[in-house]
């Protein structure tokens, strides 16, 4: 049975897509799939899920078989107790998803923390990743997230945050608007869509678990980057991103032999939300031609 892409907040054409489920490590993992052609796997950010790609999937599906995951612990996937959320464990789970979904190789697109997971996954299995597309990826040269990670993982802060966060939709809205370069570009239903999984028990434990190993994970990621230097890579960033420092883009790009950077002026951390037409065109150009029109 086909259901409207998550929250009845889809493309203007009311695009329909089908949910899929696999069992991974004894838990149910949800993903969306559509299209034909080479596999393209989409990996969301820290508190996002497959909903993030509602404007991208219909476009990408015209030339690829798109798999948009809800990583275990977030979205509508299960939230197993004691889930290891360090960067390497998340990357290994992503590779096990590829196995379960019978994806031998793919183009891999990750945003924010999902960008870091994608890079780490590529370093663990470089022969399986044809190309990387990184959207404002967390990386060792951006320090924007470090103070937040240190604060939220303090022993006296974490239990308060976990008990209150699911009920603070006003705060959710404030934080989401801050991720835009121009909050007037936020479309109706966006906050509702992102907030929907927060009502499920354990919705914020994944984020706290990720933050617990933030510093060590970035060191491991830096050490892993030489293993993926040969993979053709496209980096997309908003010039006024205040979640992951756009000034880190040049240093990150120099870690790759064949890398293009597209900086979107006046755009924040969520270009696929804020300027979806421009974002989709750039990614499709890269997938089709091996380069993006600048």
Image: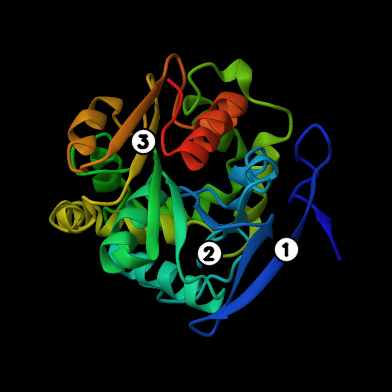
**Residue that numbered label 1 is attached to:** 19
Residue 82 location (% of width, % of height): 40, 76
> Does residue 165 sit above or below 183 in this rendering?
below
Image quadrant for the C terminus? top left
> Does residue 161 sit above or below 190 in this rendering?
below
Q: Nearer the viewer, residue 16 or 198?
A: 16
Residue 23 seen by the camera: yes
Would you say 280 lies left or right of 220 here?
Answer: right
Residue 67 location (% of width, % of height): 59, 59
Disc 1 to disc 2, C-alpha distance: 22 Å
Question: Which numbered tag is attached to residue 235?
Answer: 3
Q: Secondary structure at mark 2?
A: loop
- Count neighbours of disc 2 (C-alpha within 10 A) and say few if under 14, some if 14 to 19, many if 20 or more: some
**N-terminal label among 1 and 2:** 1
Question: Residue at 47% across / 25% down in the picture?
Answer: 178
Residue 47 location (% of width, % of height): 49, 49
Q: Farthest residue to the bottom: give it.
A: 26
Disc 1 to disc 3, C-alpha distance: 28 Å
Question: Residue at 19% across / 59% down in the picture?
Answer: 227
**N-terminal label among 2 and 3:** 2
**Residue that numbered label 2 is attached to:** 202
**N-terminal label among 1 and 3:** 1
């Amino acid at each position: 049975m086909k259901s409207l892409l998550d929250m009845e907040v889809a493309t203007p054409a009311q695009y329909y897509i089908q949910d899929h489920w696999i069992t991974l490590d004894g838990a149910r993992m949800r993903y969306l799939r559509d299209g034909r052609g080479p596999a393209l796997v989409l990996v969301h950010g820290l508190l996002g899920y497959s909903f993030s790609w509602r404007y991208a999937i219909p476009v990408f599906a015209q030339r690829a078989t798109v798999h948009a995951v809800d990583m275990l612990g977030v979205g509508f996937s299960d939230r197993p107790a004691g889930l290891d959320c360090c960067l390497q464990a998340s990357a290994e789970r992503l590779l096990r998803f590829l196995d379960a979904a019978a994806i031998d190789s793919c183009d891999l697109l990750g945003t924010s923390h999902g960008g870091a997971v994608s890079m780490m996954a590529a370093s663990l299995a470089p022969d399986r990743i044809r190309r990387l597309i990184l959207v404002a990826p967390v990386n060792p040269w951006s320090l924007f997230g470090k103070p937040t990670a240190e604060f939220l993982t303090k022993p006296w802060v974490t239990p308060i945050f976990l008990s209150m966060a699911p009920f603070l939709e006003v705060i959710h809205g404030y934080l989401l608007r801050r991720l835009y370069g121009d909050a007037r570009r936020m479309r109706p239903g966006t906050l509702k869509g992102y907030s929907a999984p927060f009502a499920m028990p354990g919705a914020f434990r994944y984020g706290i678990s990720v933050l617990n190993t933030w510093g060590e994970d970035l060191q491991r990621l830096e050490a892993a980057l030489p293993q993926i230097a040969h993979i053709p890579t496209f980096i997309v960033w908003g010039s006024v991103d205040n979640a992951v420092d756009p000034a880190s883009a040049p240093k990150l790009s120099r870690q790759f032999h064949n890398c293009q950077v597209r900086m979107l002026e006046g755009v924040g951390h969520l270009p696929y939300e804020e300027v979806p037409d421009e974002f989709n065109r750039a990614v499709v150009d890269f997938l089709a031609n091996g380069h993006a029109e600048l």
